[in-house]
Image (cartoon, helix red, strand yellow):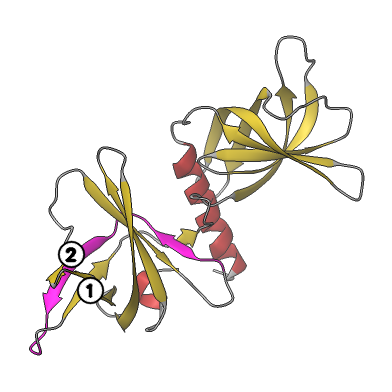
Amino acid sequence: MHLEELTAGLGVTFYVNIANAQQMTFESKITEVNPKKHLVLVEAIIRDDKVLTFKGKIGISVDMVVAFPDEKPLLFQHISMETLKFDDNTFCYNISCTKEGIPYNRRGSFRCFIGNPTHIKGGKDMEEHEVILRDASATGFSITCGPEVPLEIEQLAHVLLEDYIEELNKNYSFHLYGIVVRKQELENGKIVYGFRLNNKVGGLENYLTQKERIRIKKSRGK
């Protein structure tokens, strides 16, 4: 979904990312949508009778999450914000973004369904086992496997994510090292293990974003 497909009245959250890894959040709402100019207007944030502005500040980027009543929130990354002043001395933000919004969960990163078979290795004393890489995000992943896979909470394990995206005619390959943080037994006897990535994986977030955008377009029949 693009910005111009949003509607007035939707609540938004700004995530202001600062170069030293700090993050601030601010709540607001959309007041107007301009499809022709591909932008939206959002109520300005006032603090101590002053409008907060972020444009032009070195080392700062702003992401915007839009909330929907019956759907997952959408994340618009690295938006452009321009402060506008009206004749009645009120202010708003003129928001634009070249990227489509992507599904967002409030744990900090959206999870993209993968569903590919792979192998898992959990240390030098554990044999490789066949598993299904269920989903992945920029911060973690999960697998589905049988009860014979001997994993424990806080155990470090490795899986290989390999995928081919036909629409892009491109192969992807990522080594995922994660720590087990969750175990869930399913009714069919299978087990889902959730992992927190042990380190940032270069290129992974871009791959997940591309894959999710293609999935959304297919679901809309485009």
C-alpha gap between disc 1 and disc 2: 7 Å
- Picture quarter with the C terminus: bottom right
Residue 12, image x, y percentages: 38, 70
Q: Which residue occupies 54% across, 27% down?
A: 198
Q: Is residue 86 inside the magenta stretch?
A: yes
Q: Across the whole image, how many numbered discs are drawn on residues?
A: 2
Q: Quick one: which residue is furthest to the top in this view?
A: 124
| In the displayed structure image, the side of residue 180 where residue 65 appears, left or right | left
Q: Which residue is mark 2?
A: 52
| CA neighbours of label 1 inside 10 A, class few (<14), some (14 to 19), many (20+) | many
Q: Which residue occupies 90% across, 51% down?
A: 187
Q: Quick one: which residue is furthest to the right in this view?
A: 188
The magenta segment: 72-88
Residue 55, image x, y percentages: 15, 58
Q: Is residue 139 inside the magenta stretch?
A: no
Label 1 residue SS: loop
Q: Which residue is mark 1?
A: 44
Instruction: Say whether disc 1 or disc 2 marks the residue closer to the N-terminus.
Output: 1
Is the residue under label 2 in contact with that under label 1 (CB below 8 Å)? yes
Q: Amino acid at mark 2?
A: Leu
Q: Which residue occupies 7% across, 88% down?
A: 87
Q: Quick one: which residue is furthest to the bottom in this view?
A: 88
| CA neighbours of label 2 inside 10 A, class few (<14), some (14 to 19), many (20+) | few
Q: Which residue occupies 31% across, 60% down?
A: 98
Residue 184, image x, y percentages: 79, 44
Q: Amino acid at mark 1?
A: Ala
Label 2 residue SS: loop
Location of residue 52 (image quadrant): bottom left
| In the displayed structure image, the side of residue 46 where residue 119 appears, left or right | right
Q: Nearer the viewer, residue 49 or 176?
A: 49
Q: Nearer the viewer, residue 128 or 28?
A: 28
